[in-house]
Amino acid sequence: MAGGEAVNAAPTDAAHSASADEELRAALTVAGWPASLADDLSKRPKVLPNAKALVDAVLFSSHVDEIFVLPNGVQLLGHDDVLPAHFTRALQGASSVRDFLGAIDEETLSSLRGRVYCYASDTLAGDERELKTHDGTSLDSLLDKRRALPLVHPEGNIYLAELRRREKYRHPLDHRWVKTLLARDVKDFVGRDRGNAMPYWDRYDEGIFVGARFGGSPMHVDQARAPYTPCCPAALLPCCPAALHPCRCTCCTPACSMHIGELVQRG
């Protein structure tokens, strides 16, 4: 039976691979990138077999010039219900990003910030324009931007990026200051102690992105800018039981590297 199942599964796997390859080539065409990139094995992501492999990759692997993919990761990590209920309701039946944005109530939108990118009607590629102002007035909340959208960009596609709360709050799982909209994320799956041992794990400004087919942010490396600047080298000693912190001035305490993420959040 096992041998028969393997034989039967092979065509399905091959068909899935072929379909994924076609999607990749189509995406490259839309983006205006060379189709030859689809054949460059050095640029292919590493597909992980299970959630444990993802945890190992996150904690112990080099992420330089590497992309890790966990198929069905949302389900494997138990993240089916991490989005706010009003987002889930808005996504149901929405055929476009405009539909999604229009389905969220004004009170919720007024409590959110996010970037709105505008594109031509027939594409999500090419020049993009971010909606920031209208008639010289800065658009702060997502509600401000939705109201301005019909006047500034009545037609054409849009893409939403970095959706988060306007005001910080204490996350119920680790009680740190955050603006994320997610009830939990990979940090919680990895484990609080291991997550906090990392130099910095951002969910203070963690954002949600909403796009369409072939519409999304390219893979990139984020930069974390900390307003915290130690006044002496001792402030960056490694965090361990034996570590001593000779500098006790108010600008450097607490100063071990494990606290840098918290200091960034406090800033």
Image (cartoon, grey):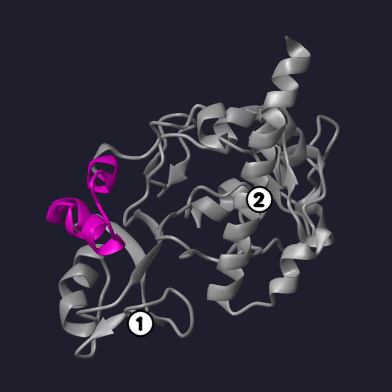
Residue to which mark 2 is pinned: 18
Magenta-colored segment: predominant secondary structure: helix
> Residue 234 appears at what percent x and percent y?
81, 53
Number of marks: 2
Q: Position of residue 30 (x, y in %)?
A: 53, 74
Please tell me which residue is depicted at 23% across the width and 71% down the height of the picture: 145
Q: Residue 212: which quarter of the image?
A: bottom left
Q: Find out whether residue 259 is within the magenta segment.
A: no
Give the magenta part as a residue range: 87-109
For residue 105: magenta? yes
Q: Residues within 10 Å of mark 1 (few under 14, many from 20)?
A: some
Residue 206 x, y percent position in the rendering: 48, 52
Q: Which picture quadrant has residue 51?
A: top right
- Location of residue 38 by image quarter: bottom right
For residue 105, side relative to residue 216 (left or right): left
Q: Which residue is mark 1?
A: 120
Task: Give the camera-side residue of 113 and 65.
Answer: 65
